[in-house]
Every structure is written in structure tokens, then in C-alpha cells.
Image (tube, coloured by chain):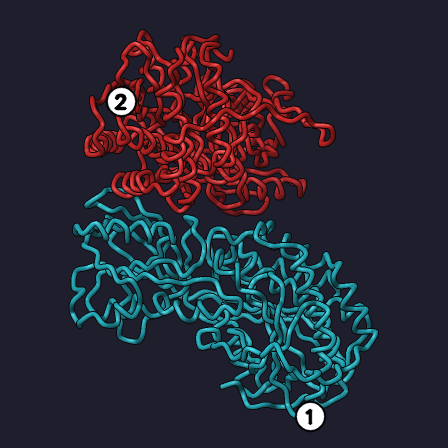
Chain colours: A cyan, B red
Amino acid sequence: MIRRLLLASALIAAPALAQRAAPPAPAPVDPKVAKLRDAALDDDIAWDIVEGMTTEVGQRLAATEAEARARTWAVAKLKTMGFKNVHVEEFQMPVWLRGTETAEIVAPFPQKLTLVALGNSGATPAQGITAPVVVFKGYGDLASAPAGSLAGKIAYIGNAMEPTQDGSSYGAFGAGRFVGPALAASKGAVATIIKSIGTDHHRNPHTGGTNWPQGVTPIPAAALSVPDAEQLERVAARGKPVTIHLTMTPRFAGQGTSGNVIAEVPGSDPKAGVVLIGGHLDSWDLGTGAIDDASGVAITAAAAKRIMDAGRPRRTIRVVWFGAEEPGGIGGKDYARVHGGERHAIATESDFGADRIWRFETNLSDSAAAVTGRLQSALAPLGIVKGSGVAGDGTDVGPTLALGVGAVDLNQSGLRYFDTHHTPDDVIDRIDKDQLRQNVAAWTTMLAIVADAPEEIGAVPPRR
Amino acid sequence: MIRRLLLASALIAAPALAQRAAPPAPAPVDPKVAKLRDAALDDDIAWDIVEGMTTEVGQRLAATEAEARARTWAVAKLKTMGFKNVHVEEFQMPVWLRGTETAEIVAPFPQKLTLVALGNSGATPAQGITAPVVVFKGYGDLASAPAGSLAGKIAYIGNAMEPTQDGSSYGAFGAGRFVGPALAASKGAVATIIKSIGTDHHRNPHTGGTNWPQGVTPIPAAALSVPDAEQLERVAARGKPVTIHLTMTPRFAGQGTSGNVIAEVPGSDPKAGVVLIGGHLDSWDLGTGAIDDASGVAITAAAAKRIMDAGRPRRTIRVVWFGAEEPGGIGGKDYARVHGGERHAIATESDFGADRIWRFETNLSDSAAAVTGRLQSALAPLGIVKGSGVAGDGTDVGPTLALGVGAVDLNQSGLRYFDTHHTPDDVIDRIDKDQLRQNVAAWTTMLAIVADAPEEIGAVPPRR
């Protein structure tokens, strides 16, 4: 998921229906771009990558042997596709591994609950812990709890997340996962159980990383599926004290190796700057990482291949399948460390599933202002509108963007994304082939325009 | 689920649109019946029962302490509601308990699979077994496999089940579960893994009983979730041998106690026969048994209470919350053993979820032929059509029906039922309050007409 969504807000003013001025004449669409776009609506390359990676590799937890197998798979695939300069750039990182994770309501109504550990969760003793539960309906209620009031208790944090097309409800309600466990720990809690940061009603809990500030000792932190969380709230609403037995044995396993897989479509003008695109190769370990983010690496690589096959572009297109995004964008940081000194025209990633792109936004130097108009005309037939915000999403490209690199964001619909995000249900069944093809068409269009733009695409002030 | 659906077939002839004769004049609807029906569309009683049972008891596996707690809960609830003669009729039965259940593809592409043991499954050694997999796309392919050809192998049985409104696809594709494992065992298989008998695409496998004919030693038998089954098929389609490591430790735990919970609305005419209605109290252990079958016991009890509150009916309405339906209709058999000698007017159950009733059918003595017409008129405003088949569904009422008792079936839509049936997802989230109320209205209407019918409702030839 995209870190910058945490602070995203709706910037679109509602237009009045009456008395609208005629819009300015759209920029003409280059017939070559239109042809590439329309051909991509029949794309099978992206599906082939998603199907192959999820079938032949499966889950790809960062810095594990599964992620290493994924890198091997990726290098072979990208070479077969004809990309140049295909290689891995390794880096070291802490390894976190899931263990046992079970929970039961002991009283007043004995029953099992379905939950999963959050990434970076601490562990209980092997025999588990039994403790009373304090129910907080939301993160705000936890924040108001007095210091020390959770001593010896399990904190439960609910939320009222609903789907949003722009994904902004993830940032709005995600605090319960991102920082809730640490806050509860600071108030004495022996464990934290959150309602999944998710919008489905299936018994598939949503994992995801949680953060421990310096000085806070990790406590066990887990997510209940949405139905289990609502069940716990119903049980608690009966008014009797609720006791839970919780067993969780995840562990930190020292340092391990992850890496970014890099492939290029060499451009004819090395001075025009690199067009950096990609997604992340790692996934959480519960599903097969189909929408998060096999689809993102597949969409961007498929689009780049279509441009490559149509002839040498002006700018080099660099496809990066980042490692270790989920534990905190570690691959993206390493990329910026290694490549931040190179000239980039734009940096843009796909990490929000495979549903249709509904909006695009840009952050381009004034010298490239006309590019936005050309994108608008060429993307409109795909049902894509121009947003009024400033581009700059992306955990993996974030550290590169922060150096003053331009961006073009192609925003996928988030209406279904958080039904599946970080759950066992993140499998290929969730991907709609036609919407996946629309993504490839949009990315192909974007690359055709940006990589060949005659204008200089220079440095910009980062979005923030 | 309803045993008789196994052999159900579509009996409805497609009517020509042109030149249709005017239908016969509908029977008039008794205003008292209409009033009861319409009031039931605001029912909260059924929801209260489902919410209470699933929250305060949770899963209710047959012959376990959880089912015993459910009986205690049920007796208290039915007494509070004002029913008479509330009591439990216990019986003994074999107990089967779930254990560990894990599986991984070892080769060619290592990855975990999500599965659950089928009821009555045998066990592997504690350390599991590792064996090659033979993929059968359907039960028919397994049936064609030569004797002995599965020696030392794990049989996988797929299916192509799709939703059907009348639920008939369960019977059509269920053989893979009902008898597939035993057939594979007879051909030498060391374990059987089936694709869940289900119509969803979530990673929640569907459990359910499997049968071992006399002389067949149970082997481990499990169901993969639909996405996991399709994943296994994709992996196998790559053409390399597939090896699975399977660990399953369910066990038979001797004899245990189950029981039927019985409650009555006494009638004014003891000679007119009992109207037997109900559902089953036990559930599988993965979810909380909301649609299978808290909703059935709730719908029928709510309707009976509405009739009770409107004044003494002619016939006694007996509400039975059957025990141990899932392991093979054990409660229903015990009921017929104990009560088969009593005069019953009809016997009818609700065990197909909580979605709207779309059809009704009857099997009534000629003396009561007019009852069907009155049902048709009174149920039509609820969107319910008269089917052209003969009533007689129901695992629990089956043994009573077999004695020559009449039936009125109120058929719920099965279009969503097998998305959730026997999975962890069988929780209250699946129940639509308005559709639940339509069920209560239909049952209230049926009871108002049948319990008070002035006609004799006598013995019938059973459907088969």
C-alpha cells in the first residue's frame, strides 16, 4: 500500500451542473500513442506475469527464501521478455517470521477467534497469556485512555472503515494498526488486538506492519477478521467482563537478504533522464500477493515491453520490482541510496491492485506542462479523469520523489482493494482481466507520451 | 443441508408466453392470515435468536460441550418466549473432533495450501505424510480410475459447481465429498483432497461429512478452499509431478451425548395431528452456524411464537431444534424413533439459510387439497411461487416424512447459500435482515393456514 495515502485528502471541488463554460480544446492525440493504447486493451502479458508469479512462487515474504525464489523467477522472466541490464541489487534487513497465532474468548462466552499477527508483532510465551480485554471503538478512544490504565490488559481497537475510491479511508482508519499497538503498550497493555483495517466481511484477517518507536518494547499485536472483531464487540456489549487467551509466537530472525530486481528499456537520449516505474516483488505471507503487488509489477513491465517492442524510446525506461516494500519500503530506500544521484524524469509506481484506473495526476516541471494535457486527451478514452491534486504517491518511489523528481500517478479504484489487502484472499481470483488490461493500456499510454516527450522534464518541488 | 436435494431435479416446464389461458380464480386470503403475514415483515424475533445463539454460544459441533451449552441456551430461550412443554430429548452418538490440518505443496512450487478436514476424516501420523498427487477434474474421472491405481497416492477431486436457486448443484457435484474419499480409498489412495463443494472464491474451505461404507478404513479426507483447489490445478497443469505434505489429526472420541430440544404451542384439537417444524441446533465448528442453521431454528420459532401470540391454534405446533444434523441427521432419526407413532399433520423444516423464500411445494392428502390453493394466494404477495414438484425436503424431518406424513416446503434461494455453507464465513454477517423477515412472514402464513385448516390433513405416500 501507498504510504502517502495516509495523508491524502479529497481535493476535488464539486462542479455546478448549470452554466459551465466550454472546456479548452483538448490536446490532439498522437496516432501512434492511440494505437499503442488500444492494442494494450488486448494485453495478455500482465496476466501471464501475475499468473506465473502467484502460481510458481506463491507468497514472497521479505528477506525469506520465498522472496529469493521470486527474484530468481523475476530475473528469468524479465530476460525472456527482452529487457536489458536485468540484474538484482541486494540489501540487508531484519527478518520477521510468523509463528503460531490463536485466540479464544475464555469468558463470558467461550469461542475461538480468527486473527493474524501484525508484521513486527512481539510474542507471547509459548503457552499464551490470559487477560481481560478493554474495548476501544476506535483509535481516538485509545488515545484518550489514561496513562497506565491498560496495565495487565489486552487492548482492542475497533474502526469504522468503509471503502473509498481514492483509498483515503486507509489513512483515516489505519492508525489503529500503524501506531495503535505501540500506544497501547505505552499505557501498559500486554497485547493489542485490532479490528482488521479492511472493508470486507469475511473471516480473513488483514495483516500489515506495525511500528514500535525507539524505546517501546514490542508487545503481541494482532488483527481480528472484521466479523470476529464485530463478534468481540457484540460479546463485550453484553456487559460482562471479557477475558481472552492469546497465543502468538512470531519472531525476529536476525538480518537477511532482500533485493530490488531491475530491468531496462534503453533510451536514445541518456541526458533526458530515466523514467522509473515498477511495483514491489515482496508480499505478505498469507495470500499469494496477487493484487499486492504482482499486479503492479506485471502492469508496469507489460507496458514497458509494449513500448520496447514499438521501437527505441527517447528516455530509458527503468522497471524496478522492489524488494521488501511491506516491512517499510526498504527496497525503495535502497534504490534511492544507490540511484538517487542519477537523473530521473519521473518516478511512478503501481501498488494499489488491479482494478481500473479512474484518475491521473501529475507533478511535472513547468517545461513539461504540455505533457499533462497530452496525457489527459490520450487517457480520456479509457475513462480516466484528471484529478486536481499533485502527484507523488508511492512507498517505493517516495525516497526518489523526495529528491525532486517529477511524478505521474495513475490511480486505481480502491473500492474493492481493502476487501482483500493483506489477507489470505489476496490471490489471483481477485483480479479482473479486463480491468487489468485497462491498467496496461493506461501505463502504455503514459509511457508512450512521457518517455518520448520532446520537452525537458526537469526537477520539481516534491509534493511535501 | 437438505439430504433430498441430492436427488432433486428441475420439474418446471417452461410455459409459452403467448396464448396463455387465464389462471383459475385465486382462493381468497383470510384477513387474519394476511394481517399475521404482514406484521411478520417487521419481525425482530428471528434476528434476536440468531444474534443471541451465534454470539453467546458460537459454534455447536454435535455431541460436544458446545452443543450442550446450546441446548441449555435453547431451553432458556424457548421458555422465555412462552412455549409449553419445553424439554430436551437426549441420544448417544459417536463423537468426531477436528485436529491439526495443514498442507504444503512440496514440489514443484513449494507453497502452503488452506484446507480443512471433512467430518469423519481419518488421520495422518502426527508428522504427516508426503505423497504424489493424482488430479481428477471431477468425481466421474475418479470413478473411471483403475482399481489399485491410487496406491500410495493422494487423490485430488475437483468439481465445476455453480450456484443454483434450488440448490440442485449441491447434489450434482457433492459426490466428490459424500463418497469420493471412500472411492479413492478403495483404489488405494492414502488420502483424498477435494475442491470444496462451494461456489465462492474465498480462502475459506467448506467442511461437511464424508461417508465410509462398512469395511472401508477411513483415510485422511480434506477440502481445499476453491482458490487453493484452482491453484493446485494450475500447478499440476504445468506438467511436473506434484508432491504434497499433509498433516491431519482429527480423531473419533467415543460416544457422546446430543439431543433434540422440543417446544410446543398446544392446539385445541389433539386429534387433528401435530404440525412439526424446526431446524437444527448443531453446526459445523468452523463458523458460528448462522445460516446453517441458527436461521432455521430462529425462523420457525419466530413464526410459531407469532401464531401462539395470536391465539390458540387448532393443531399443536411442535418446534424441534434438532441435534446432530450435520453428522448424518442423527437427531431427526431419533425424533422419528420416539415420536413416529404420534399423529402428525405435516413435517417441515428450514435448513437452507436465510435468503428469501422463492417457491413452495406441498404433499398433502386429498382431503386437504384446498390448503395448497390458500397457501398460494396468501404467499404470492411475498414473491413466492408454487412449484410443480412434490414437497418432502429435509434431513431432520425425512425419517418422519418417510412414515407417510404430509409436507409443505418453503424453499429459500440457494444462489448465495453455497458461498458460505460449512465455512468459517458462516457467521451473522451473511444474514440479510429483510430476507430473514420475509422468511418469518412466509412461515407465519403457512402455520396460520395449516395449523387452523378445518380440513383433515391425513397420511400421504412419501415423495419416494
Residue at image point 61% right, 90% down: A459
Report x, y in % for residue B133. 57, 33
Callout 2: SS: strand
B407 and A328: which one is in front? B407
Q: Say which quarter of the image contains residue A390.
A: bottom right
Q: Mark 2 and mark 1, same subunit?
A: no
In the drawing, does residue B73 fall left or right of residue A120?
A: left
Residue A387 lies in quadrant: bottom right
- Which residue is painted at 39% across and 21% down in the image? B450
A32 is higher (above) or lower (below) than B250: below
Q: Is residue A16 left or right of residue B190?
A: right
Question: In this rendering, would A225 be left or right of B308?
Answer: right
Q: Name the residue nearer the viewer: A18 or B402.
A: A18
Q: What element carries label 1?
A: helix
> Residue A423: where, in percent of width, then height?
46, 54
Q: Distance between the residues labelled 2 and 1?
A: 81 Å
In which chain is the residue bearing label 2? B
From the viewer's perspective, tell me whether residue A392 is left or right of residue A228: right
Tell me, yes or no, if residue B181 can be seen here.
Answer: no
Viewer-proximal residue among B337 and A127:
B337
- Amino acid bearing label 1: Ser
Query: x, y (%) of residue A370?
Result: 71, 87
- Disc 2 marks a residue whose amino acid type is Gly
The percent coordinates of residue A236 (x first, y second) are 23, 52
Q: Which residue sits at x=46%, y=10%?
A: B365
Please give the residue where the numbered disc 1 appears in the rendered image: A367
Q: Name the residue under label 2.
A: B259
